[in-house]
Image (cartoon, rainbow, N blue to C red):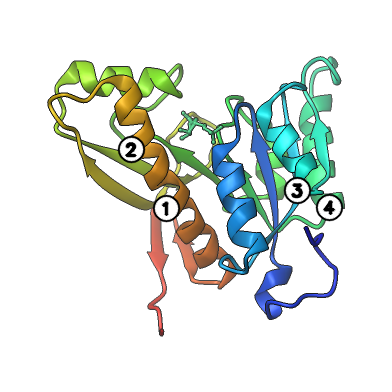
Amino acid sequence: MLQCGTANPFGENAAYCLGVLASGGGTNLQAILNRSASGRLPARVGVVIGNNSKSGALVRARRAGVPAIHLSGRTHPQPGSLDRAISETLRSHGVNLVVLAGYMKKLGPATLESYRNRIVNIHPALLPAFGGKGMFGKRVHEAVVQSGAQVSGATVHLVDEEYDTGPIILQRRIRVAPEDTPDSLAGKVLAVEHELYAEAIRLFAEGKIRVDGRNVRILSERR
Ligand code: GAR
């Protein structure tokens, strides 16, 4: 895997550098790594930060030759020091866009300020429904199935100080079948997430995202 800032065989935009933060298994990270390696995504992963030293995401990053760094309350117990370490790690790796991929922690003010409007998150439902504190991973799909909702999907949004409240960038819907369980729904939504996240990152890398307050505008695409 090529690092950010090295010679670039995919054209100018391949220098666009991602810093991925992840807590869990890391399938969204893997989807990004795969697309980047094959030239389908004009961006590279410069660093992966995980708050869980044993997470699959850190294993996947190392396997791809990407710097994989464990930063958590364990490594940085002093108030504010974890936030500063995250923001410095992102900056020192030349990160342009911060990508939360199943990252279950809130970011602190230093990181939010350094990367204002350049931090994205993916949520496994159609926000503003089924979001907020405590709504992550399988819990989201359990709540959707229990509610009887007939549609769900994935949302990519900008990250602000709260959980799941930042301006929405892209959403994609899927139908919830009467026989869906939280697990079957999770699988369907995850497949959509992998496509949708790559699409959102591409738009950022190509400079096609404009943020105006709560409104995100996507500049028209010439293909
Ligand atoms: C994904 O479904 C992601 O949307 C979700 O965690 C999963 C991580 O999967 N994130 C949230 O619920 C955030 N509120 P992955 O580790 O396989 O990418």
- Label whose residue precedes the other's in the sequence (2 or 1): 2
Splitting the image into 4 quarters, where does residue 132 fall? top left
User: Residue visible at 30% across and 29% down?
Assistant: 185
Q: Are marks 2 and 1 in contact (CB under 8 Å)?
A: no
Pointer 3 residue: 64
Q: Are marks 2 and 3 in contact (CB under 8 Å)?
A: no
Three-letter amino acid code at the position of disc 4: His
Look at the image and tell me in which quarter the N terminus lies: bottom right
Q: Position of residue 64 (x, y in %)?
A: 75, 48
Could you say which disc has been placed on residue 93 in the image?
4
Number of residues whose C-alpha sits closer than 10 Å to that of mark 3, classed few (under 14), some (14–19) or many (20 or more) = some
Number of residues whose C-alpha sits closer than 10 Å to that of mark 1, classed few (under 14), some (14–19) or many (20 or more) = some
Of 216 and 207, the residue lying toward us: 207
Could you say which disc has been placed on residue 206 in the image?
none
Tell me the CA gap for discs 2 and 1. Answer: 13 Å
User: Residue visible at 15% across and 31% down?
Assistant: 177
Pointer 2 residue: 188
Look at the image and tell me in which quarter the C terminus lies: bottom left
- Label whose residue precedes the other's in the sequence (4 or 3): 3
Secondary structure of residue under mark 4: loop
Visible in this render: residue 118? no
User: Residue visible at 69% across and 66% down?
Assistant: 16
Tell me the CA gap for discs 4 and 3. Answer: 16 Å
Pointer 1 residue: 196
Number of residues whose C-alpha sits closer than 10 Å to that of mark 2, classed few (under 14), some (14–19) or many (20 or more) = some
Q: Position of residue 139 (x, y in %)?
A: 39, 17
Visible in this render: residue 208? yes
Three-letter amino acid code at the position of disc 3: Ala
